[in-house]
Amino acid sequence: MSDILFQPLGNPVAAGEGLDQIADIDPRLTRTNYFDGRLLTAEDLTRDQLYLDQRLRELGRVLGSGVMDGLELSFDRFTGLLTLEKGQALTPAGRVLELGSQLMVNLGDRALISQLNDSNFRYLNRALYAVVLRYVDVGTDIAEVFPKDLGAQRGAQYALITESVQMGLVPLPVPLPQQSSLQIRSRLMREFLGNEQFSSLIPEDAVALGVLAIQNDTPQWLDAQLLRHPVRAEPGLGDLQADLSRQYEQLLSDILSTRRSGGLTGDFLATDYFSLMPPVGTLPKDAVNPMTGRQGYFPENYQVAIAPIRQSDVDLIKAESLNLPPIDLSNGEPVDVVVLAPLTNLDYGHYGAQLERELDSTNRRLPQIDLLKLKLYPVRPVHALDTDLNAWTNIWGRLGDNQPFYVRRPTRAAETGISGIVLALGASVPAPAQTEETGSNPADSGGLVQDENAVFLNRMNLKTLAELRRPGDADSKKAFDKMSGNFGKDAMIVTLCAGILIRIERQYDRLIWQTLLALADGKLLEDFLGGLLAADAEAPTPKVVAKLGDALGLDAKLVKQWAELAP
């Protein structure tokens, strides 16, 4: 059986016909056909060089583009030196760039810069520039060119083509406003993120290493993270978040350094500098005080809590959190944030045990807690037990060089009994307040994580019950709406209603929602459900309900309606 073949690109030509007139199918991917007796010219050998070069670049384009290793960029404003450390990168054109030794450029040496640029750029315009490393080939050494005929003279030509790399500046179409460098860099973080327009400005044979600001013909500042990224093909959401995270961490470090040099602390609002933050990142230790239950970093409408975490779990939680959306500080929408304090396994086991609460398995409505979010008590005392204050004082003192970090939304974790502390914005710790009516206590179970009632209501609520047992008429609809408004956020009432609906058949849905509303108003749901479960299983449901309703003091009209349904 012969192979199935198809005509290659180009016009079909019969074998052996018009060989002297056949054009290349793709000159870029054409290689020389060698055979004995053939006269080879420089063009033939160059063709093979181009062929191998293009094949290697095709492989490079498949791998993506970006910095592979090293190439850290730094700038000294006092000396004007731009320093690039050795490393490797891959360009969008597929070329590998390798810098084998440190490269230093004096941006104040305008004579040299002008000489390297054909007498241009003796003056640098006020603008933002992308610092790039690009591929360049340079002719080196001299070889004699012999004449092809008797009338020609000898000449000279470059003997070698040396491939190298060169650092340069690419102007960006972004204005340089009269603002502090920290505010400008923060704005660029948001503007550059995922914007292909700026990536397209970088030459295909180059990679971006950072952004440099020049004003009054003098370099002002360098951000070595903007526009820079590791090797990758098409960037995904996690890649963009990783870029934002690197830029945020660098800018935050510079902010803290600038504030310290001016005699300021790290207690400041994030909105003073940032408008966009990654879903996970470091925050200043000075802006958080778990002993008084205060945080001054996030906006007031954010739900902020704090908990200890094992140092060994930090990398995993950070990696998983990078797949979440960034935190937009400019839109005013509330965000749930958890501040995590990394501890060694030994310290975590010791101090975490002091924060544990006993779980109330009787009143739990879920077998486990899924989301790693601390239980919030905006009007409850911060420290439920005396051990809380001592434990957090020790935890905060043992952080050392391990800075606390935040996550927008926690990852899945095994349930623990460790209590969390709600952090208010500049608020004083409220006095203990517990009444018999509320019956709740900040030491309730929930430990790490979101309030159990909230998780339960996300899965089962009055709306989901009504989708299964739809109100049949206007009276039922009115009763359901009232009940949903009054009791829709009470997980215990939803649980009791579900138990009652399981016991009462569908044919009685005409009265069920009116009955549930009356029972909920009278706080009789639990007694009613207990009566249903204790009743004779063979007895007709309307008769059982009417008897229980009369005993519990329900409206006589409603009880009569149930009685009339009995066979």
Image (cartoon, grey):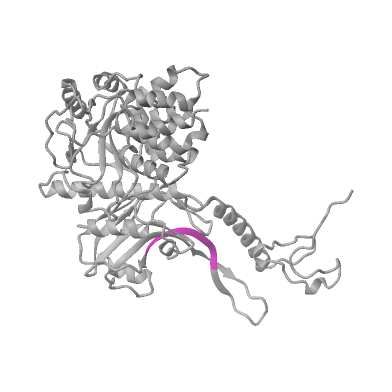
Q: Is residue 453 visible to the viewer in this orientation of the structure?
A: no
Predominant SS of the magenta segment: strand
Side of 407 where 9 appears, left or right? right
* Residue 559 image point, x, y percent: 39, 30
Residue 40 percent across, percent down from the top left? 71, 66
Q: Where in the figure is residue 274, as x and y percent of width and height? A: 26, 53
Measured as percent of width and height from the top left, residue 146 is found at: 62, 72
Q: Is residue 309 magenta?
A: no
Question: Which residue is farthest right?
Answer: 1
Of residue 59 and residue 373, the one placed in the foreground of this image is 373
Determine whether 132 is above or below 277 in the image. Answer: below
Which quadrant holds residue 349? top left
- Residue 82 visible in the shown view: yes
> Foreground: 345 or 263?
345
Q: How many marks?
A: 0
Which residue is more in the foreground, 519 or 11? 519
The magenta segment: 158-169
Q: Residue furthest bottom?
A: 151
| Residue 210 vs residue 517, the one in the foreground | 517
Q: Residue at x 43, y 17 (%)?
A: 534
Q: Residue at x 40, y 63 (%)?
A: 198
Residue in the image at 44% along x and 31% along y: 562
Inspect the magenta stretch and tell me whether residue 164 lies in it: yes
In the picture, measured across the screen, residue 47 lies left or right of residue 259, that is right
